[in-house]
Amino acid sequence: MWNYEKRLQYPVNITQPNAKIAQYIMSQYGGPDGEIGASMRYLSQRFTMPNRMAAAVLNDVATEELAHLEMVSTIV
């Protein structure tokens, strides 16, 4: 069971803007190796997994990737 708290596990504190780093961070949001792509891959694999234990692990990993997406979106 998951309990959602409206706070990030690791606080995001931006002290000064940096265009190069911002470009890299935005690619982590939705790029080819980004967090949203990873979470969608894990979720789609979860729904086709015949083994329920493995499906539960994939579900947990996908949820963790969505938490990463939340941190990246807060930075952006």
Image: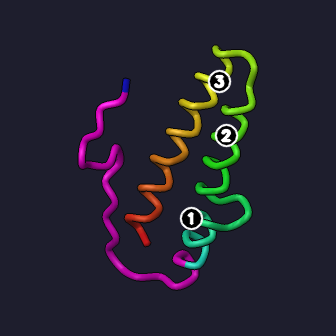
Q: CA distance from mark 3 to mark 2?
A: 9 Å
Closest to the observer, 66 or 11: 66
Q: Residues within 10 Å of mark 1 (few under 14, many from 20)?
A: many
Amino acid type, mark 3: Ala
Q: Give the residue type that dot 2 points to.
A: Tyr
Q: In front: mark 1 or mark 2?
A: 2
Q: Which mark is residue 55?
A: 3
- The residue sitting at 72% across, 36% down in the picture is 45
Q: Which mark is residue 29?
A: 1
Relative placement, left or right, of 5 versus 16 is left
28 w.r.t. 3: above or below:
below
Principal SS element in the magenta part?
A: loop
Q: Residue at x 72, y 16 (%)?
A: 51
Location of the N terminus by quadrant is top left
Give the Cα distance between marks 1 and 2.
16 Å
Q: Which residues are magenta?
A: 2-22
